[in-house]
Image (spheres, rainbow, N blue to C red):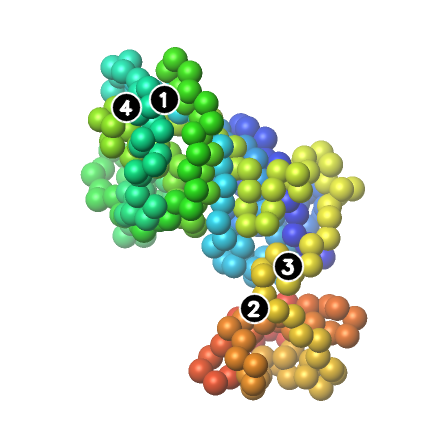
Amino acid sequence: MNRIIVVDKPKGMTSREVVNAVGKKIGTKKIGHTGTLDPMAEGVLVLLTGKYTKLNKRLTSINKEYIATVKMGLLTDTLDLEGTVVKEDGRTATKEQLEKLFETFPKRYLQEVPLYSAVKVHGKKLYEYARCGRDVTLPKREVEIYSLKLLEVKKDTFTFQVLVSKGTYIRSLIRDFGDQLHLLFTLSSLIRTKQGKFTLDDAISIEETPSKIQEYPLEEILEIPVEVVDSKQAFAIQNGQKLPNPKGYESILFVTASNIPLAIYQKDGETLKVDVMLGGKEV
């Protein structure tokens, strides 16, 4: 069974626990998610089953939107309230300071990955270095902030909405906000409201699977053209053959006359080559 399943991840569960719970409900072990949410986070978690698990890279790379609440005046080792407090001074920012920060904060910058993350350095996950007390140089990644909106400011917290590129850590973004203002900021709550075209309105609870699983046309989700092929072309595609590219496609989804996905091809010089095989023989 090849499915895209959009789940509203509850707070307190790991993304892997959600995957296991949904997999058990629909009776499959071939299932995975397309972007980890920390246990304290909630919201949109996109799952893939069957041959659609091969789409992981494409769906992981799309933009994500969050609503986050920040605790001001303290900093923890994990950059969220589940960690150990390492600094605390109680100082806060005003609404005016935050509005100016959001107006001037760089739209693209090198973000330092948090120590408590699964990013690997020399074959070892960063959180493993943290747990054994070993020093490690934290890698930096270029991230992009597409939109940033201040929603609410209270005595010692503020809430904002942000749309970001793949690989952006909201915990790190919040720390960087604090650094800009010379203040201590820590994530207190996080909701992923959107991943690509999927929103919270699309998401179902774990309990609602499998009865409320929706069908999503791949060409709309992946935002690529689709082309129907005849049986001769389908045979060539199922065998992973390169194809001519007279229309100059960068990427295209080939389907059968009955709308069964065969493969996604991508541009390779003057031809097209297999990127993701969705039906037929493996290549």
User: Residue at label 3?
Assistant: 220
Earlier in the chain: of badge 3 and badge 1, it is: 1
The answer to whether 89 is drawn above or below residue 218 in the figure is above
Query: Does the CB distance between marks 4 and 2 fall below 8 Å?
Result: no
User: Residue at label 1?
Assistant: 95
Earlier in the chain: of badge 4 and badge 2, it is: 4
Residue 6, percent across and down? 64, 44
Q: Amino acid at mark 2?
A: Val
User: Residue at label 2?
Assistant: 276
The C terminus: image quadrant = bottom right
Which mark identifies residue 184?
4
Instruction: Determine the residue positioned at 48% across, 85% down.
Output: 270
Query: Does the CB distance between marks 3 and 1 fall below 8 Å?
Result: no
Instruction: Determine the residue positioned at 79% across, 71% down.
Output: 258
Quarter residue 232 falls in: bottom right
Q: Amino acid at mark 3?
A: Glu
The answer to whether 263 is drawn above or below residue 204 in the figure is below
How far apart in space, not on screen, are marks 3 and 4 (Cα)? 42 Å
Quarter residue 44 falls in: top right
Question: What secondary structure is marked by label 3?
Answer: helix
Looking at the image, which is closer to me, 181 or 55?
181
Query: Closer to the camera: disc 1 or disc 2?
Result: 1
How far apart in space, not on screen, are marks 1 and 2 (Cα)? 48 Å
Earlier in the chain: of badge 2 and badge 3, it is: 3
Decide: few, some or many residues near mark 1? Use Cα within 10 Å; few <14, some 14-19, many ≥20.
some
Question: What secondary structure is marked by label 2?
Answer: strand
Query: Does the CB distance between marks 3 and 4 fall below 8 Å?
Result: no
Query: Closer to the camera: disc 4 or disc 1?
Result: 1
Residue 55, percent across and down? 56, 60
